[in-house]
Image (cartoon, helix red, strand yellow):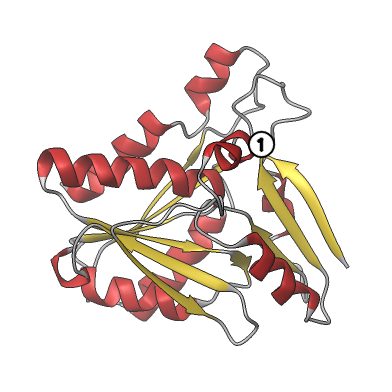
Amino acid sequence: MIIRTPSGGGRGYGPTHSQSLEKHFLGVPHLRVVASSLVHDPAAVLSALLSQDSPALLVEHKLLYPLHLMLPTGGRIEGDIAEQQVSADGLPTVSIRPVARKDCSFTVLAYGYQAELARRVLSQLAVEEEIFGELVVPSQIAPLHWEPIEDSVNHTRSLIVIEEGVEGCTWGSGVAARISARFFGELRRPVATAASDPTVIPASKALEAGMLMTQERVGRAIRKVAS
């Protein structure tokens, strides 16, 4: 069984229609939690999920729907250098970087709409300031395929995890614990996490923009790590 559901805020729908509800399902045994993005082939992801015995929750951020429609045929964005690794279960993780991995100074891990915001920020930093980071975008966010993430961090020695879910017991905190233990004493700085403010999402779009992980907030978080 695959359950598809919209998720995320940004449209001023208020506290009952704007949550990143995937957060409540992370860690449920034998349940796959998958997030659509603009860098994964949705047909390939669905095919991989249908070949598995375990149930899956497929979340689709609302703001990705119009973006997908405005893209050229295929509906996917490809970065300057894109690398795809597929887990044993057939779920892809894509890495996007403007230069060779050896020249990237930090890794950004994000999924869904936050991955698109991070991609825009990294592109701007690369063009305007020659600051290079690698973006890793998993299609399955629980359980994670760790190899692509650890491969990137092994080169950059720096990681920031970005998500739209509110702070507190987050996806990012779980990643930070794993990576901090795996690379104990080898990282150039502690693993950073960035999430939305721990509060009910307001209906006012102005107030909503102040507490969610907008592109501006994603940019500030990434710059802090890049510096």
State the image coordinates of residue 34 (x, y, percent, origin top left): 66, 62
Amino acid type for the residue under numbered disc 1: Lys
Residue in front for this viewpoint, 96 or 8: 96
Residue in front for this viewpoint, 45 or 195: 45
Task: Estimate how packed mark 1 is, as few (under 14), some (14 to 19) or many (20 or more) residues with alpha carbons within 10 Å.
Answer: some
Q: Identify the residue shown where x is 53% and y is 77%.
A: 145
Q: What residue is disc 1 on?
A: 62
Residue in front for this viewpoint, 60 or 149: 60
What is the residue that sits farthest to the front in this orientation? 73
What is the residue that sits farthest to the bottom in this orientation? 88
Q: Identify the residue shown where x is 58% and y is 64%.
A: 139
**Does residue 209 appear in the picture of this structure?**
yes
Q: Identify the residue shown where x is 24% and y is 39%.
A: 124
**Location of residue 26 with respect to 197 vertically, above or below:** below
Q: Quadrant of the N terminus?
A: bottom right
Answer left or right for 51 relative to 68.
Answer: right
